[in-house]
Image: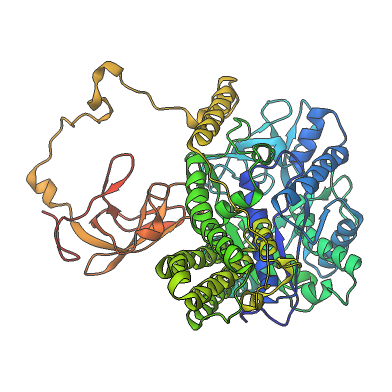
Amino acid sequence: MSSDEFPTERTAVVTCGLPYANGDLHIGHLRGYIGADAFSRALKTLGQRTAYVCGSDMHGTPVAVNAEKEGVDPEEFALRWHEQYSETFPKFSVEFDNYGHTHDETNTELTREIVTTLDEEGYVYEKEIKVAYDPDADQYLPDRYVEGTCPYCGSKARGDECDEGCQRHLEPGEVENPTSSITGNTAEYRERAHKFFRVSEFTDYLTEFLDGLEGTPNARNQPRQWIEDGLQDWCITRDMDWGIDYPGEGADGLVLYVWVDAPIEYIASTKQYTERVGSDAYDWEDVWKDGGDIVHVIGRDIIQHHTVFWPAMLEAAGYTAPRAVAATGFITIDGKGLSTSRNRAIWAREYLEEGFHPDLLRYYLTTTGGLQQDVDFTWEAFQEKVNGELVGTVGNFCYRSLLFAQRNYEGTPETDVSDEVEARIEGAIGEVREAVNDYSLRGIGQATTRLAQFGNEYIQRNEPWKLTDYDPEQAAQVIRDCVQLAKAIAVLFEPIAPGKAQALWEQLGEDSAVGDTGLEAALEQPPRHFDAPSELFEKLEDDRVEELTEQLEAKIDAASDDGDDDAADDAPTDADDEEAGGDADLEPLLEERISFDDFQDLDIRVGRIESAEGIEGADALARLEVDIGLETRQVVAGIKQLHDLENLPGEKCILLANMEPATLFGVESNGMILAAGEEADLLTTHGDADLGEKVR
């Protein structure tokens, strides 16, 4: 790892969490792949030697389960989805330098080699453990064949993950109240010999690793709690036929756990890229064996695998640890979680069938909120983003500028760019460099949008259409500046919107690929002549948005009416009769009264929120630092999905200070902020009450 700013002299690689070869892609999946693609493109724009690699995750229980349901071989089933992904990603301008899969020869051989090294170095041992067994089916039950209760938080768990609660990785035998997904019967635990990796020996190393890890804060902070709680050794084998056989002795009938061979595909895919282009162009060993810059972009539900198991494996096998892990938040639809079973999703194929340009979605997903924040998708919000920022700001400036330039000067006026505009472009370049080193995709996109906004203000302020009559020299200067701004926008926008950036580049008369340029091209002389431009973006009309919203609601309702097994997740609460009127939703007043003395026992203080961040693994909870004058308190509040946490610092609030401390999701809460209603409307003061002042 390195703390040197990008670009570095080292070779880099960007990866994204492997998609399970198990079903259609939706926008929740695309957020990560588009984000990693944009970051890789941005690195290349900075001049970093890098590659973007990934592959399909062919193994694991979900693949085996669904293949069995279809009555086909798991390899045939997984390859079908792998081929579909290979065709779909380019349609969203997600361009991997190499896209392999975990069942290919390269990954299989490399996995066996690495596991053999772990074994030979003494990091693997055998232990008898309890494994779920279905007596009726007469077979052991790996991972997703087991359903039950998480032993840590009590939520519903499936096999190796508490995916509806605390998101912890679960070892075989940990799921409580196990049932078999094969027969639906109660499973029993039986003793079985399995192989374990000594993760516990890497506690000090992983602590140091996290101290230096770059990326998003959630990727650094979430695993610290697991390390502090004490690392458990990791079972790396499973009772399955589908997967990579354990390479050593004494493991008959066992395959490697999917999370062993899946991340190794990052190395295998990089190696395949080198084999295709040659080591002179790109050497995979420079990255993985000689201290290259490795950046993983993943979903936050797999942080533990990438910040605990994976770096421990790499260290034990003599490979380079990641420089950064950037974990994305989740995508919700109209404020509710994605549900493939209820068809509550915007599928990749549906988006394309609607005829929308992929760059519209790329822009929405990369610039709506920070990378680690949850993003809520609605067609109305999509429309607002497209019409306001792409059509109204970027598209409007570029079209009006180039059209005026072509009509009046047949292209770029023959003069130099002004000092003011050159400085503004240099500032935007600096913003992009800073955003890349902050792992901020939003920052990259916003730097471009702000530059276009400046351009609109600049052309409106100078009114070149008036200057042509009484000051033609100044008119030419203004338009020359605007053409240069348009060229800079094309260069800076390429990582986020590569298709539209290339279209703008060609409208400027450039005959190369904008993706092959560097940031310095933003200030290079534009071509002297170019043809009349066309508009880059089209406005999304209200009736189209209403239609799309109705279609989405209809398909969700249809799926819910079918009675799918997880429909209860969003079951409405009981409502009072409609005749009760507008007050029916209010809770009735309590009959029991308290005395004035009881009220005086409540120590309620005026506070100010100093910081706010979501708690990983908790859908609703946020950790706040609240200054109450005498001290600053750490408080946990259920406002994560109801408030923009970035906007809370500086806001005054009312805090119950003598509330007994409580620990929620591993975070101690020392007080309670007061709020009203289901939307958690935070109580505050009307005047200028001092911090710490008591509410009486």
Would residue 681 be visible to someone looking at this image? yes
Q: Is residue 118 above or below residue 615?
A: below
Q: Is residue 258 above or below residue 134?
A: below
Query: Which residue occupies the foreground of this view, 255 or 262?
Result: 262
Would residue 438 be visible to someone looking at this image? no
x%, y% of residue 55?
Answer: 79, 54
x%, y% of residue 615?
Answer: 46, 55
Q: Is residue 574 left or right of residue 214?
A: left
Q: Is residue 285 above or below residue 72?
A: below
The residue that appears at 40% across and 60% down in the rendered structure is: 646
Q: Quadrant of the N terminus?
A: bottom right
The residue that appears at 61% across and 64% down in the rendered structure is: 406
Query: Which residue occupies the foreground of this view, 312 or 107?
Result: 107
Q: Residue furthest left?
A: 596
Quarter assignment of residue 205: bottom right
Q: Is residue 117 left or right of residue 590?
A: right
x%, y% of residue 231?
Answer: 62, 61
Q: Is residue 639 above or below residue 483?
A: above
Query: Which residue occupies the foreground of this view, 127 or 311?
Result: 311
Structure colour scheme: rainbow
The residue that appears at 56% across and 29% down in the rendered structure is: 551
Quarter assignment of residue 292: bottom right
